[in-house]
Amino acid sequence: MKSRKFQFQRYQLTKQAAAVVRSGHPWIFKSHLSTAADVIPAGQWLGLVDSENRNIGFGLRESQGAIGIRVFSQKEEPTREFWAARLDRAIQRRDQLLKYTDGFRLLHGENDGVPGVVIDVYRGNAMLQTYSPTVDSLGRYMTQLARQRLGFSSIVWRLPAKRRRETEKEAQILFGYAPEIANIREGGLKIAVPILSGQKGGAFLDLRNLRKWISLRKDLGGKRVLNLFSYTGTLGLAAETAGAREIWNVDRAKPALEFGRVHHSLGKAKVQVIEADVFRWIRSLNVDEKFDLIIVDPPQMASAIEQVPKALAMYKTLYHEVLKNLSPGGRIVAACCTSRIKREQFEDLVQRVLGRDMKLEANLKAEDDHPVGFPEGDYLKIVAYRARS
Ligand SMILES: C[S@@+](CC[C@H](N)C(=O)[O-])C[C@H]1O[C@@H](n2cnc3c(N)ncnc32)[C@H](O)[C@@H]1O
């Protein structure tokens, strides 16, 4: 892709699909395509025209899942200059953030105008993730372009969890020497990231605001924290920074817990790691174990709309269970990372289960490096409640 010119095939959209492009949404679902699309191979670049043959956008034919065409642009033809401009805009958006951290998301897929392509940077080590084979070469191209601007010491290419399960492809080093662990700084926190083997490309960068919020709760001094779905325990580390005296990190991923035990403890608090299925474990937790802060950050439980009722039922059970272990005046942090569950729906549910004795204390906004560019991009909700005293 580096040297060749993009070749566009003309494709006439149905009225419904043309409306999608005009609305600025980056996905045309297969159900909105005409049968003429059936013979267009995956990965073909498309010039999109409406029923009156007017050019209304540019896209890429997708083959997997529900997406039929990824729309890149409404007006401009995607040239090399076009992609470079998208990258430069993304870099500019993160300008302020780089004063605070050297671990950040450089490209957030559709939300930064580069569908299906995610690039994270961990202290100069770039981590590319591509969500479909059709965007693999675009992802590699964008990463090389970013290297020219930011000077990476290494580039690693990993597939997101779902693709990894399907292909069993391991991390691939595209450039330089990639360390097993990258140590990033986030404000006053030092976070170790297992870049070759961790979940979500290594670290949950989208929890940065929450780590900051927790580390600033000085009234956590001497308190107990239950960190459910802890992964490597960076939220526990934030609580320790705030002065917590005891932290329980619970997750079912043993490697992540072990990694956290080694890297994410300051030695000031008593940190326990518990390998368990939280949904079962929480039911057996003794009511006498009281915590001043309980963090609930489960995995994405609904990737399809049909899964939403079950996911909501699981949230309900979880919040009902954790309430019994909350100290008087304590806090519960609730996170939900699926766009299938709407913001209001999630907040209503949690507030209803927690009851009127718990007051909303904070509603954290999306990170600057995780901009929300379309409805499905608004996936993460983080709310904190506090028991009225
Ligand atoms: C959204 S991530 C949590 C990120 C974490 N809070 C952090 O600070 O980095 C979800 C976590 O849930 C864990 N997990 C998934 N299903 C689980 C289960 N049934 N019981 C316990 N942990 C689970 C995964 O291993 C993953 O670490």
Image (cartoon, rainbow, N blue to C red):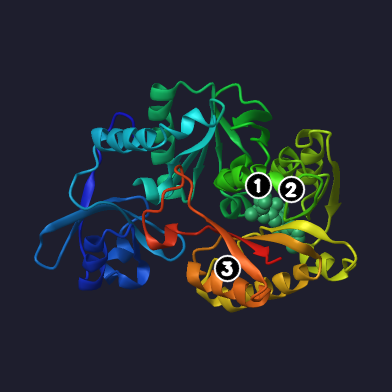
Q: Quadrant location of the C terminus?
A: bottom right
Q: Earlier in the sequence, mark 2 or mark 1?
A: 1
Which residue is the site of mark 2? Answer: 220
Binning the other alpha carbons within 10 Å of mark 1 as few (below 14), some (14 to 19) or many (20 upward) gives: many
Binning the other alpha carbons within 10 Å of mark 3 as few (below 14), some (14 to 19) or many (20 upward) gives: some
x%, y% of residue 24?
27, 58
Q: Quadrant location of the N terminus?
A: top left
* Residue under the image location 84 percent in, 61 percent down: 290
How far separated are the C-alphas under marks 1 and 3? 27 Å
Which residue is the site of mark 3? Answer: 302
Ligand 1 falls in which quarter? bottom right
Q: Which mark lies nearer to you, 1 or 3?
A: 1
Residue 101, placed above or below residue 75: above
* Residue under the image location 31 percent in, 62 percent down: 39
Labelled disc at residue 214:
1
Residue 53, placed above or below residue 309: above
How far separated are the C-alphas under marks 2 and 1? 9 Å
Residues under numbered marks 2 and 1 in contact, where contact means CB atoms less than 8 Å apart: yes
Residue 290, placed above or below residue 270: below
Label 1 lies in ligand 1 vicinity (Cβ under 8 Å): no
